[in-house]
């Protein structure tokens, strides 16, 4: 099995003074030591020849336990998130499920009340049957008061998603971390703070620096950035959590293939540039939506003023370096059409924004979460407004994107 003691000598040493634009290009992507290839080879193999019985060459034994291409991705996400360790998985959902295995029956998870539908499904329809108690609460308004009302001696995980999916709620991660410091939860330990950073990416937000214990991503989204792979990653600086999660990664076996890891690594090289463009484009789209009288609600972390100002804009300014590429809105009733009817017509009427699930790719996407990505929370306390439209704003020319939104709204 591949571990730190048997790690190949080609592992990069990241300069702590490197800025994000440099890290995204180089972390985990140092030249191949054997040939000097700038684009490292993809180790498309399931097993490795050993130098002797019990003497794996360079620590490599079997690809479920470790693969050089996957190791590069794990190095990369650790460096990008400012952590000591990284791990990669077959999907964001597989990452979440592995982290959740840190819990035992009878223990409790406090989960923010606006999360990806698959996260709700995991806790409510899979883990609850195993004796895990998940409670969904709003931590965006007063996180300390919300925690005070819910923390018990059974609390094992506090699970945040910020910005949240799809309502784009923001949570003060540092405030949550400070409150947990003084609490003795399950096993007499401080609860583990987990943050889903998928919507922001490490370019915009680094939860470990704010006090989180584990940060994870659906790398399918912004990290890979091209809608051509499914992958998940996590980072942590806690050695104890890393050792347990490394064991679970190998034991459960929900690992990504090397080519998928390569695709994420390739995407990460342009992550810093892409997030700047995503944010700039989304800001223009959000401002256009906010200026219209036939739009009832706009939610975007970059709107700090006016009737559609984000309620946690101060947290965005303090915690995020950019407002991100996700925008949600609800059309107003108009010309005898309901908000829901107009939302559906808008989603089906765009030409550049493709009607599709997922997010974070270079291309712009539009969806109606209530019947698409968040159908699993229907009729639950986490139910999404039926007429809410979610935009994943891509990196196309912003003038074309704004024109597409205006045209679709005018016709809706």
Image (cartoon, rainbow, N blue to C red):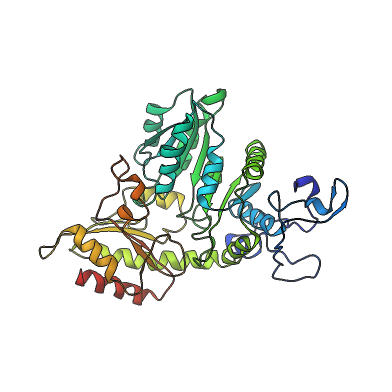
Image point 44% across, 45% down: which residue? 119
Residue 77 x %, y % = 61, 54
Report whether 261 appears left or right of 130. right
Observer-nearest residue: 266 or 81?
Answer: 266
Residue 150 x %, y % = 40, 28
Observer-nearest residue: 253 or 35?
Answer: 253
Image point 56% across, 66% down: which residue? 267
User: Residue reaching furthest right?
Assistant: 52
Observer-nearest residue: 294 or 376?
Answer: 376
Image point 68% across, 50% down: which residue? 64
User: Residue reaching furthest left?
Assistant: 336
Observer-nearest residue: 362 or 103?
Answer: 103
Please identify the quarter of the rendering in which residue 395 is found. Answer: bottom left
Residue 189 x %, y % = 56, 26
Name above or below for residue 148 compared with residue 342. Answer: above
- How many marks on residues? 0
Please identify the quarter of the rendering in which residue 403 is found. Answer: bottom left
> Is residue 296 in sight in this rendering?
yes
Which quarter of the rendered picture does the C terminus lie within?
bottom left
Report whether 410 appears left or right of 214. left
Residue 181 x %, y % = 52, 30
Image point 37% across, 32% down: which residue? 146
């Amino acid at each position: 099995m591949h571990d730190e003691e048997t790690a190949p000598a080609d592992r990069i040493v990241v300069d702590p003074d490197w800025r994000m634009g440099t890290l995204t290009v180089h972390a985990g992507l140092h030249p191949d030591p054997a040939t000097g290839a700038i684009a490292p080879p993809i180790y498309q193999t399931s097993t490795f020849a050993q130098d002797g019985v019990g003497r794996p060459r360079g620590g490599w034994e079997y690809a479920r336990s470790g693969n050089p291409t996957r190791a590069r991705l794990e190095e990369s996400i650790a460096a990008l998130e400012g952590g000591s360790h990284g791990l990669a998985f077959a999907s964001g959902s597989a990452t979440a499920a592995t982290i959740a295995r840190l819990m035992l029956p009878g223990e409790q998870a406090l989960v923010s009340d606006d999360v990806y539908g698959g996260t709700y499904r995991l806790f409510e329809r899979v883990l609850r049957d195993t004796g895990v108690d998940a409670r969904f609460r709003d931590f965006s308004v007063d996180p300390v008061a919300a925690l005070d009302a819910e923390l018990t001696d059974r609390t094992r995980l506090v699970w945040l998603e910020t910005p949240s999916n799809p309502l784009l709620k923001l949570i003060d991660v540092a405030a949550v971390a400070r409150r947990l410091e003084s609490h003795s939860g399950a096993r007499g330990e401080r609860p583990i703070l987990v943050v889903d950073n998928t919507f922001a990416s490490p370019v915009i937000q680094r939860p470990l620096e704010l006090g989180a214990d584990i940060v994870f991503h659906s790398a399918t989204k912004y990290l890979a950035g091209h809608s051509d792979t499914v992958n998940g990653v996590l980072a942590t600086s806690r050695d104890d959590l890393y050792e347990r999660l490394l064991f679970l990664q190998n034991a459960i076996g929900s690992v990504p293939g090397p080519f998928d890891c390569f695709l994420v690594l390739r995407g990460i090289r342009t992550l810093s540039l892409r997030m700047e463009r995503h944010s700039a484009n989304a800001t223009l789209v959000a401002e256009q939506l906010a200026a219209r009288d036939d739009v009832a609600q706009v939610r975007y972390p970059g709107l700090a003023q006016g009737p559609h100002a984000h309620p946690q804009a101060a947290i965005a300014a303090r915690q995020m370096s950019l407002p991100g590429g996700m925008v949600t809105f609800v059309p107003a009733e108009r010309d005898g059409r309901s908000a829901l009817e107009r939302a559906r017509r808008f989603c089906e009427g765009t030409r550049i924004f493709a009607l599709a699930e997922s997010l974070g790719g270079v291309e712009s996407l539009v969806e109606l979460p209530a019947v698409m990505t968040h159908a699993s929370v229907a009729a639950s306390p986490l139910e999404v407004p039926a007429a809410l439209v979610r935009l994943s704003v891509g990196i196309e020319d912003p003038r074309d994107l704004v024109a597409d939104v205006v045209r679709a709204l005018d016709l809706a």
